[in-house]
Amino acid sequence: EEQLLESGGDLVQPGGSLRLSCAASGFMFGEHAMSWVRQAPGKGLEWVSSINHSGGNSYFADSVKGRFTISRDNAKNTVILQMNSLRVDDTAVYFCAKVPAPIVGVTTYFQQWGQGTLVTVSS
Amino acid sequence: SYEVTQPPSVSVSPGQTARITCSGDGLPKRYANWYQQKSGQAPVLVIYKDSERPSGIPERFSGSSSGTTVTLTITAVQAEDEADYYCQSADSSGTLVFGGGTKLTV
């Protein structure tokens, strides 16, 4: 059974940093691009970032560009979202999602989702 | 920037057909995908590449595309279909986008 398990969510002050992890199991992790999607309380889904299967290419929403980085360790079946210079409006549940292809492009969609981890940015 | 637009809400009675639209100038050249999200749960993919249905998704869920609008159709709606529905698309630069979501009330 395919599983995605996010961790690392916490309460952090504005300007702080946080590192989210997503542990994958049940599929060939190294053959799939991966993504992060977030959902602020009571709001809709917002794509945050994606990374190709090899880690060679990554993509970011304008709202997080320059503050967030994404990486992956295919030996450990893990994808990481490093979040710096956090703002109050980064408060959200962050979902990890599997892309059913090795690269991100016009056909990209999210085939499998984790249950999410809550990030709260507040003083 | 690339955007897609959905109606905030759709309401139907059980057994009726629900149609949820998603509009965007780029849609004729890009696929749309649909997700169902029930309260407190993670999203679930219900339609991909405009009209493909993943295994395990009931046949009453279908998708279609015409020009700048894609449509998620749910026939013979059941109470369990009450949820938020999101369309999603992508461009060749790797930018992904979600619509604002449509709350389906049954």
Image (cartoon, rainbow, N blue to C red):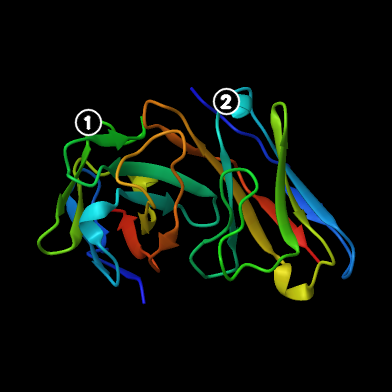
Q: Secondary structure at mark 1?
A: loop
Residue projecting furthest to the bottom: A1
Q: To which residue does mark 2 refer?
A: B29
Left or right of A75 in this view: B23: right
Residue A38 place in picture, x, y as percent: 41, 51
Give the camera-side residue of B1 and A43: B1
The numbered mark at residue A76 is none
Q: Determine the residue positioned at 57% across, 25% down.
A: B29
Residue type at mark 2 is Lys
Q: Secondary structure at mark 2?
A: helix
Residue type at mark 1 is Gly
Label 2 CA crowd tier, 10 Å (few <14, some 14–19, many 20+):
few
Give the camera-side residue of B23 and A53: A53
The chain containing the residue under callout 2 comes to B
Q: Determine the residue positioned at 27% across, 63% down.
A: A9
Left or right of A86 in this view: B27: right
The chain containing the residue under callout 1 comes to A
**Disc 1 from disc 2: Cα separation:** 29 Å
On screen, A56 above or below A13? Answer: above
Left or right of B22 in this view: A74: left
What is the quadrant of residue B58 in the picture? bottom right
Q: To which residue does mark 1 refer?
A: A66
Q: Determine the residue positioned at 24% across, 60% down.
A: A29
Residue B99 place in picture, x, y as percent: 59, 41
Residue projecting furthest to the left: A75
